[in-house]
Image: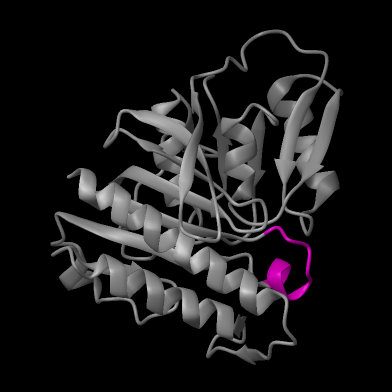
Amino acid sequence: MKDLVEIALQAGIEASEKILEIYHTDFDVYKKSDHSPVTDADLASTNILETQLAQFDIPIISEEKEIPLYEDRKKFDQYFLIDPLDGTKEFIGKTGEFCINIALVVKETPVLGFIFNPTEKEVLIGGSYTNEVVRYEFHSNGKFHHVQTLSPTSTNNKKDVVRLICSRRADFERLKFSAMDRFQTEKIEIITKGSALKFIDLAMDRADYYLRFGKTMEWDIAPGFAILKQLSGSIDHLDYNKPLSFNKENLLNPPFIAYNNK
């Protein structure tokens, strides 16, 4: 289904442009029922993505919509898992470090991921569905062009420093001590990045590992999972070293470690 990739790509580009348009205005911030922030950009992106993806007979699970009951969604053979604006706090804070997440999940495994970076006008696409990971740059007119095809990079080679990427709101001391213990080195470089853009840095070999203790949901990491798996990496449970599963009864993720080829 080549059309699926093309349509999801075009939908993400359109949503990216709408998000940027709102980003450069004096937008309002609202509170959701869980007290987390939401903006008109979240809602506009949701509308664009769901309208475009609705042409496929595939269920959609979105951060900004009511989650289907587990009794219903556990029967899904496949579904889209989307976060129309990942990094709303970064968007509000004008850091530029926000993105759009789209994943196609088959049973319990993401097989295709899209991570759109609106501010840099780039998107990473990949997974077992396409059997590759590619980076495109896109333009305001909806056109895009291929920039590169990524291949696995080894994090197993001896490096002077372990590059650890994390949220700018992370507990840096806790992360550093955990990394020192796990990797048996005191040479830890902390890199901060907002949203799922961290997975782009992992895939592009700009960071080695992403450790996460804080709260994340399945839609925050599903595209990154598909992309990293295609690059012989993974997102593993921090304690059990097994790949995370998806479409759980509770969509909250456990603490995890993400990496490119190990």
Res. 55 image quadrant: bottom left
- What's the residue at 47%, 74% (across, down)? 45
Above or below 81: residue 199: above
- What's the residue at 64%, 45% (across, down)? 198
- What's the residue at 70%, 56% (across, down)? 194
Res. 37 image quadrant: bottom right
Residue 115: percent from the left, percent from the top? 50, 50
The C terminus sits in image quarter: top right
Q: Which residues are magenta?
A: 89-97
Res. 80 image quadrant: bottom left
Above or below 154: residue 211: below
Residue 85: percent from the left, percent from the top? 54, 68
Above or below 95: residue 242: above
Look at the image and tell me whether residue 168 can be seen: yes
Q: Is residue 65 left or right of residue 18?
A: left
Residue 248: percent from the left, percent from the top? 32, 59
Above or below 249: residue 135: above
Q: Is residue 186 magenta?
A: no
Look at the image and tell me whether residue 241 can be seen: no
The N terminus sits in image quarter: top left
Specify the farthest residue to the top: 158
Q: Is residue 42 left or right of residue 96?
A: left
* Total numbered badges shown on the rendered structure: 0
Residue 76: percent from the left, percent from the top? 16, 60
- What's the residue at 86%, 23% (across, down)? 187
